[in-house]
Image (spheres, rainbow, N blue to C red):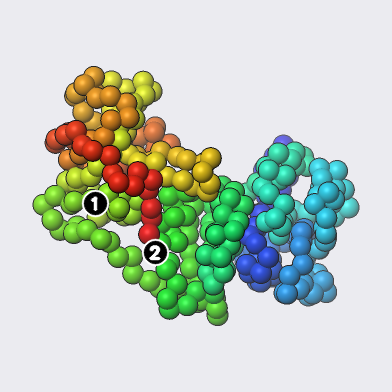
Amino acid sequence: MSLRNKIPVYVINGFLESGKTTFVRETITDPYFSDGGTTLLIACEEGEEEYNPQYLKAFGNVMVQVEEKEDFTEAFLKTCQKQHGPTQVVIEYNGMWGMDLLRNMNLPGGWFLAQIITMADAGTFDLYMQNMKSLFMDMAKEADLIIFNRCVDDTPADTYKRNMRAMNPNAQVEFERENGEPFEFEESLPYDLEAEIIEIEDIDFGIWYVDAMDHPENYDGKTVRFKGMVYKNRSLGSEYFLPGRKVMTCCADDVAFLGYLCHTKNLDKLRRGQWLMVTAQVRYEERREYSGRSGPVLYTKALKSAEAPQVEMVSFS
């Protein structure tokens, strides 16, 4: 199948009243988004904001409403393809349905998932995270772009960004005010980047982990010291291991290990699961462990046995 017959699918997810409809409406009526063909909008829930079908039609869009989860099927999508012949598809997805429904679905011939965008209302985000954290994380963990809208002056944007980037390192995270203007904020760090050795306290490991990936200019060539648990695997080679920490990404059953590749000539002396105080120089290299992209590689200057932190699970606040 030639590229001109490929049909990109854009998925916009998030909870009710998270700003999905406003974002979709502004996007599909933007002349830069239109490819000159038909954009099929599949709306999977109704919020306070609504679509004007006539207005959408003026921009070459056609909308189909899906009210029940049971109606969002492979057969339904094939019918949409046959009836409307879209050149691109936008799905305003119902976050309460769970992403497995879409994740396990066979899309019609030619359709391909081009982008996933997750919307979040900064004003209600903490409440949703207290009650439906696993649902949100399921939406955001594969997102290409995460947008926090309706930000105000005291929105803890730096904390939100670190949590999202730790859970989904590939996601771009953006913040907007109520009027759609970018929300500017300063990402403060709890340690001294100008110190001869940057001392990372146990409580600050998560902050350092995210910042080291996002801002290589802060660490390239510098020396850091932190406490980490040893993870060894043959796939890393005979001189590399991961010193890191565990993080709960959404629930008690969903725990991941975060760490950066670390070089040492004393790998055989290390036990998997032991705690070390690591002093190492940070360099940035293109590695297969980072999917061929540039990422932090630690070159050890000193490794010392250490006691486990009082709180072993990582925080990003």
Position of residue 77 in the picture relative to residue 313 (left or right): right
Residue 108 vertical placement versus 127 (above, below): above
Residue 23, image quadrant: bottom right
Upstream in sequence: badge 2 or badge 1: 2
Name the amino acid type tagged 2.
Answer: Asp
Residue drawn at point x = 23 percent, y = 50 percent: 200
Position of residue 269 in the picture relative to residue 247 (left or right): left
Q: Is residue 149 visible?
A: no
Residue drawn at point x = 63 percent, y = 69 percent: 19
Q: Residues within 10 Å of mark 1 (few under 14, many from 20)?
A: some
Label 2 to label 1, Cα distance in Å? Answer: 18 Å
Checking the image for residue 80, the label placed there is none
Q: Is residue 66 visible?
A: yes
Q: Which residue is mark 1?
A: 201
From the viewer's perspective, is the residue at label 2 or at label 1 nearer?
A: 1
Who is closer to the viewer here, 310 or 202? 310
Residue drawn at point x = 73 percent, y = 70 percent: 47
Name the amino acid type tagged 1.
Answer: Glu
